[in-house]
Image (tube, grey):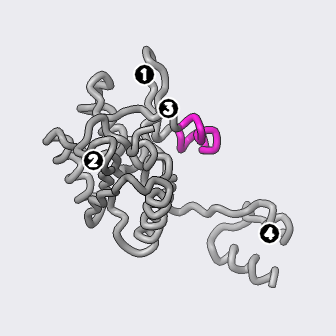
Amino acid sequence: MRPRFKLFCALSLAGVLAVSACSDSTDSGSVVILHWWKQGGEADAIGALLDLYKRQNPGVGIVDASVDGSALARSAIRSKISEGSPPDTFQANGGWGLMEWVLYNLHNADKTKMEPIDDIAADWKYLVPPEVLDSVSYTDWDKGTHVYAVPLNIHRLNTLFYNKAIFEEFDIHPENWTNLDDLFADVRQTQ
């Protein structure tokens, strides 16, 4: 397995990591990763994943080509791809953020700048919710569906995730809430 695909597999974190079809590095020396997770918990998360990769692949170097913010990262990716020297792997948001790279010029899958990772995805795609898997996949009716990125996390606004079993155990009913005050009132009753 090539080093950039190994890194791709090891990194299971807004957005997704995508593998470009061509890159600056060779398969034997180093892997270039371009991302925007440079601060706070995001920096800790990418650091932990890269450390794990380094321990599992001590002979492969990592070139951390991180930049400040998603806008600068997208610009850097665009420049690198235009120059013909894209990073081995990079961060992108799922959906159209990723499809911009998969569908070169947003409408021509035959000129993609990405390699599908179907062989890698076979190991984990059954664990990913279908909507999330769809956001990192492209279906060409002639060639089938292919996965192009590893989902790392999900950014959602105004969404609350909870453990149904725990809520049932404490007789908490989120379907009755109209605002967060209702949530806090239910939680206070369990104390």
Please report whichever mark, 2 or 3, sits nearer to the chain's N-terminal start: 2
Please report whichever mark, 4 or 1, sits nearer to the chain's N-terminal start: 1
Observer-nearest residue: 169 or 84?
84
Residue depicted at x 63% and y 38%: 126
Observer-nearest residue: 166 or 56?
56
For the C terminus, which image quadrant? bottom right
Amino acid type shown at disc 3: Asp
Is residue 131 a member of the stretch shown in magenta?
yes
Please report contact status of discs 2 and 4: CB closer than 8 Å, yes or no: no
Q: Where is residue 145 in the image (x, y as percent from the top left)?
A: 49, 26
Give the quarter of the image for residue 179. Answer: bottom right
Q: Mark 4 points at which residue?
A: 172
Amino acid type shown at disc 1: Asp
Q: Name the residue under label 1.
A: 140
**Residue sitting farthest toward the left:** 83
Magenta stretch secondary structure, dominant? helix
Q: Mark 3 points at which residue?
A: 118
Q: Mark 2 points at which residue?
A: 87
In whole angstroms, how far apart are the C-alphas of marks 2 and 3? Answer: 20 Å
Q: Nearer the viewer, mark 2 or mark 4?
A: 2
Q: Label 2's element?
A: loop
Against 182, is 82 above or below?
A: above
Please report contact status of discs 2 and 3: CB closer than 8 Å, yes or no: no
Q: Which of marks 4 and 1 is in front?
A: 1
Observer-nearest residue: 28 or 115?
28
**Disc 4 crowd, CA 10 A, few/some/many (<14, 14-19, 20+):** some
Q: Which of marks 4 and 3 is in front?
A: 3
Q: Label 1's element?
A: strand
